[in-house]
Image (cartoon, rainbow, N blue to C red):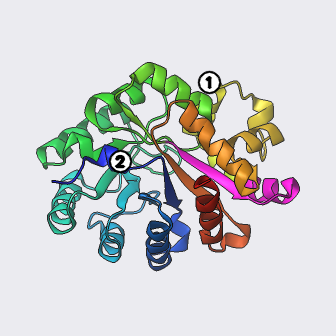
Amino acid sequence: MSAPIRTRLGALGAWLHPTYGDTARTEFAVEAEQLGYPTVWLGLGTAAVEDLAPVEQILKATTSVVVATAIVNVWTNDPTAIAESYRRLVSTYGDRFLLGVGIGHPEAVSTYRTPYASMVDYLDQLDAGGVPVDNRILAALGPRALRLAAERTLGTHPYLVVPEHTRDARATLGPDVVIAPEQTVVLDPDPLIARKIARAFVSEPYLKLSNYTNNLRRYGYTDADLDGEGSDRLIDDLVPHGTAEVVASSLRDHLAAGADHVGIQILTVDGTSPMPGYRALASELRR
């Protein structure tokens, strides 16, 4: 019997943005596995992926990595269909799939309503469909959602958070809940270039999404930080940048704050391949 997913996530994983497309992300995942990353996260946004084909493509092309969805959106994916696809993948590829689900954002989906109750109902239907609690994870930011993640899933996969959020989540949830934040980074020693890349990413759309801005206000960021394209302080905190050594140190800040795992999303100029960055970080993190 294979070890539980929680023990196989490892400390760091590769988080792959959907704009790269499924074919490229499969190639990236194969190399990430070779580089020693034990987990690959697939960003999905609001995509309808009830057949979980992007996940299956990567599971088929790799041998050992955990493949996690980040996230299956509850408004655009029927839970019964998702559960059926989950069972199919596990029966074919074994216990290598972590189902990440989340409520998304009211600005992104016209059917958005009563988010907490809708999330509870979705988890109920995953229960009925045979998706084990320890093989699913919830995108959660605020205290209520974090508690739901702890009660009904393996833990939480928060996006666009600072280490202080990780520290608070650990204090709230205790030692046994998996906390696996996403962390966006830019590997470029020039702070002006790196900040320009990061600002373009953060300002559109994230500074227009209330779930994120409300959460950032909990951590002391003000309208002066959040207005427009974001202050330098905000951009630097949300998207650490610099050499591989500097970025690796920032990733360790989340681990020191209580994270079990960090999903690393690497931004590049004009959306070029992130793999040079993953190679550099793998080399640095082995030291």
Q: Quote the CA–CA distance across marks 2 and 1.
A: 23 Å
Quadrant hosting residue 212: top right
Q: Please state if 44 lies on the left or on the right of 215 as rendered.
A: left
Q: Which mark is residue 238?
A: none
The residue positioned 42% from the left and 58% from the top of the image is 38
From this view, report whether residue 69 is shown above or below residue 162: below
Q: Quadrant of residue 148?
A: top left
Write down the region rendered in magenta. Answer: 181-199
Left or right: 248 in relation to 85: right
Q: Secondary structure at mark 2?
A: strand
Regarding mark 1 in the picture, which secondary structure is present there? helix
Residue that badge 1 annotates: 218
- Report the front residue among 59 and 77: 59
**Amino acid on which disc 2 is placed:** Val
Q: Is residue 138 above or below residue 42?
A: above
* Residue that badge 2 annotates: 101
Residue 109, position as x, y percentages in the image: 45, 51
| Crowd class of label 1 (few under 14; some 14 to 19; many from 20; radius 10 Å) | few
Q: Residues within 10 Å of mark 2 (few under 14, many from 20)?
A: many
